Image (cartoon, helix red, strand yellow):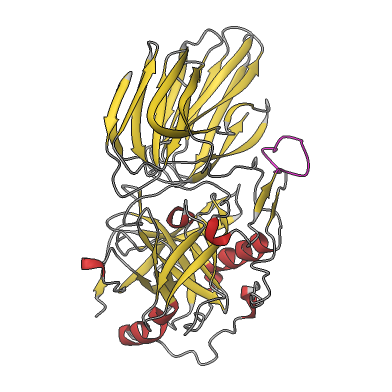
Amino acid sequence: MTRSRNHDSSWGIRSLVILSAVSAATLVLLPSDSENAAAPQPTLSPATSTAPLSSTATTPATITATTPPSTAAATTITTSVSAVPLVEALIPVTVDGVREDVAASVGFVLTLQGTGSGVIVSDDLLVTNAHVAWPGTTVSLVFLNGATHQGRVLAVDPFVDLAVIDISGLSRKPPPIALGSSSDIGVNDSLWVVGYPLPAEFTPEPTVDAGTVVGFSDWEFTGVRWFTVDAPAIGGQSGGAVVDEFGRLVGISTFGSTDSLTSIGVDDVLARVDALLDAEEVRGLDPRTVPRSGGRRTLDVSLEGEWDQQLFLGWLPDSVEVTVAGSGVTLAARTVGGEEIASGSGLIEFTPGPVFPVIVAADGSAVSAQLAASLPLVSFDDPDHGKTLARLGMTAGVYDVGHDRDFFYLDLAAGETASVTIESAARTHLWIYGPDGALIAEDVDQSGFIRNNASVDFTSNAAGRYIVALESSLSTISGYAVVTR
């Protein structure tokens, strides 16, 4: 049986959390696995122009998504979500109506990392959050009518936390949800929130919560609008439906706190889905994949300084010992959501839990060393390490895992004044290091979600290459923009 609650809370996100029952992070592209070897996967291409992103006009990039499964037995996927008709009879729904009608189109999403929710927006497509879908190429789905399915992840957008899932092979398919428009809602409007909290004894059961709109947030870099409802964020509701008083979808749940929930407006959701599937502009990013093969027991570690970090991934079923020969290196084993399993200087021993892959992070001072592991680890070469920022402009990046750390170079003349701001939905710690490696400025974004962005202004004390280092305190994937002025 579903539950109904009403809440009256003040506007604001006091403690940014992720709604997935087990927090997970994601990379941008998902490689095919053995179960989907014949199915083409979407690939991310760099921006068509090599010019840096401008602070006033960003450079478009392309995401190329191949046509979903094209085997002889495959059906044609309806990729346009705009084909779903709106509700013609505008009759306000009760909580029972939401349970019976809206919840039927909302699925329980299960991955190796945890659980979430997803919404059927067309005959063949379901949308959820990017942090729910990673790192698998498939997700397991359960619906109220008893239908179960393994959906294929077609593409993700880390900046607005969306993932598109192919459900064309689903039998006993529930109907697509009725679509509304986020442009029709305003402050104090009443809405319903539908999603799947972490199930007791693994029995998926959706909740229905009531709330009112308390505010809107815009991130100019993405061109997307979010709205916040004074309903609580419950673990597992990520990717769930937010519907208006007539039962029409107006948003997809993503971030929240104990007293408020923030959602992506449905108009932007549908535009993003169509863009991803039509290989249109999303944001400029280097191609990246989840490494799954090529693991070795001995790997090189090379760190530039305390701002640097090297990541290794392991699909590790047994107990593990990792050592590093050389001083100045700290090791930490974490889940992809950033939860620490073990840490130590030079040596860690741990047994991976049910959440995998495991991330082994090496950081510390400038050093070259060698890492040895009792089981193979795969090196992840983060494309957001060591890029040179434009002196004036905007550069896109991604926190690929929970508590990810990235760094960039910024070349300055002596006595030059510069400003660096990190725009992101993730709470960010920002550091500026001088050419000599000394820390000269730092700031912390305590609120996240494009509010009170981490930002520093400083004057260079010498000509040379400065380091812009940033670290997410969020436990999942998140896109960001480094703005230099």
Query: In the displayed image of the protein, which residue is found farthest to the bottom?
Result: 89
Judging depth in this view, the residue of 374 and 447 nearest the camera is 374
Based on the picture, tell me whether residue 324 belongs to the magenta stretch: no
Q: Is residue 12 visible?
A: no
- Figure check: 172 above or below 412: below
State which quadrant residue 462 falls in: top right
Quarter location, residue 253: bottom left
Q: Is residue 63 left or right of residue 2?
A: right
Q: Position of residue 389 (x, y in %)?
A: 64, 27
Report whether residue 37 is seen.
Answer: yes
The magenta stretch is 46-58
Query: Residue at 33% across / 68% down in the picture?
Result: 196
**Residue pictured at 60% horizontal, 42% vertical:** 288
Please identify the dominant SS of the magenta region. loop
Residue sitting at x 39%, y 14%: 325
Image quarter (top left, top right, bottom left or bottom right) of the C terminus = top right
Q: Position of residue 472 (x, y in %)?
A: 43, 37
> Image quadrant for the N terminus?
bottom left
Q: Nearer the viewer, residue 474 or 230?
A: 474
Front residue (pair 435, 405): 405
Q: Nearer the viewer, residue 483 or 158?
A: 158
Residue 368 point in image, percent of width and height: 49, 13
Residue 17 x, y percent position in the rendering: 34, 50
**Residue occupying the far right of the picture:** 49
